[in-house]
Amino acid sequence: MADARDDIRRQAELLTRTGPGTPAGELLRRYWQPVAFAKDLPDGGPPRPVRIMGEDLVLFRDDRGRAGLLGLKCSHRCADLSYGRLEDGGLRCVYHGWLYDVSGRCLEQPGEPGGGAHRDQVRHLAYPCLERGGAVWAYMGPGQPPLFPEYPALSAPEAYRFGGRWFSACNYLQGNEGNIDPVHTSYLHRFDLDQVDPYQRISTSVFGVDTAPRLSIENARFGIRLFTERSLPAQGKKILRVTNFVMPNACAIGGYETGLGRGGCSMFWHVPIDDTHHWRYEFTFHSKAKLPVHLIVDQQGSERDENDMPYRNAANRYRQDRDEMSRTFIGMGHNFPSHDLFVTESQGAIHDHGAEHLVTSDLAIARARRQIAAAIHDVEEGKDPLGVLRHPADNDFRDLLVLTEALDTAVDPSEFCRELAQENIYALNPEIAAAA
């Protein structure tokens, strides 16, 4: 048993360390990762120091509107570029005036004869950026970046989606694993449905039905598809919930938009800041109905500050109200992200897998860990890992199904999804954009 626990801990070390040169870090760098929301990088706005997977970087928008992500320290004498000037097509260091463009080329060395005769020999650390879904994304890996995946939640116009993020004081992996654990929703997120708005009431009412659901999974080209079936014996039906693990640090699940019916999803990315902290980026989308953005803003705005830092944290014991536990299971209000952050942070900064006792309801978590480990091996072998796209024909994600459906008991969930994937449940209702 001791040897088995040691093997588990060795695998955990492999999956959780994401700094430069680490196996998981090399894997995550093969995918586009969100690094900021575009609204936080306005034209003329100041450069922003950011830390991603243990790297200190500076994010900026140049005077042509292009987003750039560079190494934080100037290549000359290592001054901090986040204090730099945005001018002349790039970011200029305020120490000696060296000017860098978004690709890391040194355009000027004004203190040198001729503006720097050898400036073209300087290549500052730079990562390509693009903007999708209201966010700035970066590719931090080697070679030619892959295609950006046109997930419906990211490719739709602004009228159909809403984004936000949360700071979390724990490793990225355990943050995302909570998203593919469907049983916890019946407990951690349980509360008096009369205390919430109609949208949230509809989207969460399913969790109180059959608190020991039947689970099954299947591999998908983007990761793992997870089926959760809850019985409605009095009606001879079941509720099928379909959620997804998206390689290597994302998910596609039902969120606030579930109450609007078929055609929506929420996607989360858990992006490491370092090994013990990460950002949870959320993209909520619905193709057929207008999102209740004002309700989402009101609820989440009461739980985090303007810098996306949660008000509930370990220092204040997540503001748990024991008296409130007569109305909510954990006594921490009705905001799902706050519940999730509490429980994944409580596992420890880096969760000790060797102390776990996994059970049948953890089958998606166990499979996802194996899938990530296999992808790490692929990268080490010089192959593209699962979910990296190179061919435009593969960049269609109508099969990334997120569903909450009442079905006859006999319906096979896998076959149901195969049939539904032939349709496009994410086709946009043009009236939503017209009314925006």
Image (spheres, rainbow, N blue to C red):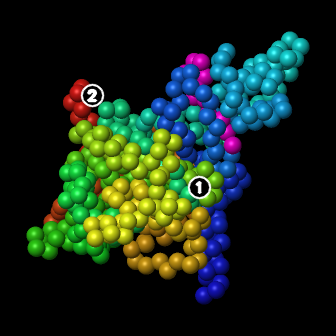
Q: Amino acid at mark 1?
A: His
Q: Residue furthest bottom?
A: 1
- Please indicate whether residue 213 sits to the left or right of residue 137 in the image: left
Magenta residues span 56-67
The image quadrant where one finds the C terminus is top left
Q: Residue at 31% across / 40% down in the picture?
A: 293
- Badge 2: residue crowd in 10 Å (few <14, some 14–19, many ≥20): few
Question: Residue 147 versus residue 198: which sits nearer the camera?
Answer: 198
Would you say residue 389 sits in the magenta stretch? no
Q: Residue at 70% across / 26% down in the picture?
A: 84
- Please indicate whether residue 399 sits to the left or right of residue 259 in the image: right
Q: Residue at 34% across / 48% down in the picture?
A: 299
Residue 408 image position (x, y, % from top left): 15, 66
Q: Residue furthest left?
A: 235
Q: Secondary structure at mark 1?
A: strand
Count of all numbered marks drawn on residues in the image? 2
Question: Residue 102 versus residue 36: which sits nearer the camera?
Answer: 36
Task: Say which of marks 1 and 2 sits in front.
Answer: 1
Q: Which residue is mark 2?
A: 436
Q: Marks 1 and 2, Cα distance to the nearest angstrom?
A: 36 Å
Q: Secondary structure at mark 2?
A: loop
